[in-house]
Amino acid sequence: MKCRPLRKMLRFYFITDDNAPSCPPIQQTRIALGAGATMIQYRNKSFSDAFLPEILQIRWLCSEWGIPLVINDDIGLAERVGADGIHVGQEDISPTVARQRLGGEAIIGVSVSNLDELRNTDLSSCDYIGTGPIFPTGTKTDAKAVKGLSGLKAIVDAAPLPVVAIGGITAHNTRACLDTGAAGIAVISFISRAPDPKANAVVLGQACGIFESHQ
Ligand code: 3NM
């Protein structure tokens, strides 16, 4: 059993965007951390060693802020940079293997897009569930059907682990997501592709009630 307050860590979960030319991942991460992000996920579907300086800088930033860094999908990269955990999809490495490789303290998240997947996923090695897309998203081209708030609530009610809502999340719909009982929201483009990423990050942090929940 982890001693960490995991639900709190999932509240404002920022995922880096490798396709946001005007605001690259290091800058995105700085902005998200400055606005109160409670977890960072490094997501780069075309990772190569050319990105090592980038991930190492993000690793360092998260350590400085005392915020966990989770790697999307790539267990080798998670091991290499000493990440705090990994987030895996249904087609990625299994959470059980991820747990064996990263150890008992690692944070392990899994994506579940509907109730059938929830029933059929072995959650015994997982710490949290990511579910989406809640709203339409242009960021993940192969996203499944939009589930809306009622679909989110169905997953939250059935899941034995904290749930993070993802897909089309903004400062305007964050409260409604949290009101379903979700532990947190995960966002990419609301910050990374905003005309003013910092302004959006700040309003998102406020919508998450970050600064109130730290008191
Ligand atoms: N996973 P944005 S939706 C990475 O449904 C990801 O599992 C999803 O980006 C899922 O905040 C998504 O820009 C993209 O909508 C989220």
Image (tube, rainbow, N blue to C red):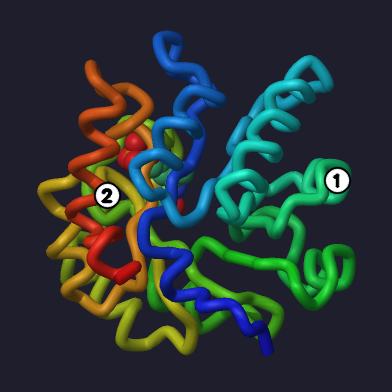
- Tell me what residue is drawn at x 63 percent, y 52 percent: 70
Q: Quadrant of the C terminus?
A: bottom left
The kind of residue tagged 1 is: Gly
Structural distance between the alpha carbons of marks 2 and 1 = 31 Å
Residue 71 or 168: which is nearer the viewer? 71
Disc 1 is placed on an element classified as helix
The reply to whether the residue tagged 2 has its Cβ within 8 angstroms of ligand 1 is no
**Compared to 73, does 125 lie above or below?**
below
Task: Dividing the image into four quarters, tell me where ligand 1 lies.
Answer: top left
Name the spot of residue 136 as percent of width and height, x first.
Answer: 23, 42
Crowding near the residue tagged with mark 2, few <14, some 14–19, many ≥20 C-alpha atoms within 10 Å: many
On screen, residue 55 versus residue 133, left or right, reads right
**Compared to 175, does 18 lie above or below?**
above
Q: Residue 76 got which mark?
A: 1
In terms of image quadrants, where is residue 115? bottom left
In terms of image quadrants, where is residue 202? top left
Residue 10 or 90: which is nearer the viewer? 10
Name the spot of residue 61 as percent of width and height, x first.
Answer: 62, 37
The kind of residue tagged 2 is: Gly
The residue where tag 2 is placed is 205
On screen, residue 6 versus residue 153, left or right, reads right
Name the spot of residue 84 as percent of width and height, x first.
Answer: 71, 58
Disc 2 is placed on an element classified as helix
- Tell me what residue is drawn at x 11 percent, y 48 percent: 172
On screen, residue 73 versus residue 143, left or right, reads right
Whether label 2 touches label 1, CB < 8 Å: no
Of the two numbered discs 2 and 1 on the same chain, state the one appearing first in sequence: 1
Residue 165 appears in the picture as rendered = no
Q: Residue furthest top?
A: 22
